[in-house]
Amino acid sequence: CVEHLSKAIENAPELQSISIRLSYGVFSDVGMERLSEAIKNASALQNISLACDEISAAGMKLLSEAIQNAPAFQSISIGLTPWNKVFSDACVEHLSKAIENAPELQSISIRLSYGVFSDVGMERLSEAIKNASALQNISLACDEISAAGMKLLSEAIQNAPAFQSISIGLTPWNKVFSDACVEHLSK
């Protein structure tokens, strides 16, 4: 299926948006490799929305490189199913590189759960946000962000020149979010 989708992307030069929502291991790093090659050649591509459960750091690296080569790229949405056991802060590192090196990127949405994104990832993501000149919107849903992570995010968005909105969603499994987190976001 990914092979056919990739061919369609390559043969649609005006394609501006891709949305893929899969689970149960049907889209993994192997599929990301082929999809990333197609994205690199999609000159009009502006938006990618992925919801899948087997993307690891290797797959995120491929996606990051593809995004950095897409000149019109504006929006990325990453959603991982609860079954993803391979996404980690290392994946956030690759995503952060894409954020830093995609000059037109305006919107980021990351929906994760089950402890796959923590304050370590938030530190790297915050660094990237500070350097993203066009970034306007961030939507995060994760379950391991503490007050320290929220402080980093708050400082980053205060320094982002085009920043307009933030949405924070927490999973029921979050045991570290507190009133201190809200205090950092209020600043």
Image (spheres, grey):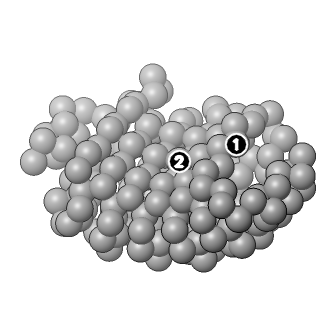
Name the amino acid, label 1: Ile
Disc 1 target residue: 20
Q: Position of residue 19 (x, y in %)?
A: 65, 43
Residue at the spot 54% in from the left edge and 59% down from the top edge? 46
Rendering quarter of residue 90: bottom right
Residue at the spot 18% in from the left edge and 44% down from the top edge? 185
The correct choice, above or below, for 168 with respect to 93 in the image is: above
| SS at badge 1 | strand
Q: Neighbour class for label 2 at 10 Å: few (<14), some, many (≥20)?
A: some
Whether residue 178 is visible here, answered yes or no, is yes
Rendering quarter of residue 123: bottom left
Q: Earlier in the sequence, mark 2 or mark 1?
A: 1
Name the amino acid, label 2: Ser
Q: Position of residue 28 (x, y in %)?
A: 79, 51
Which mark, residue 77?
2
Viewer-nearest residue: 178 or 25: 25
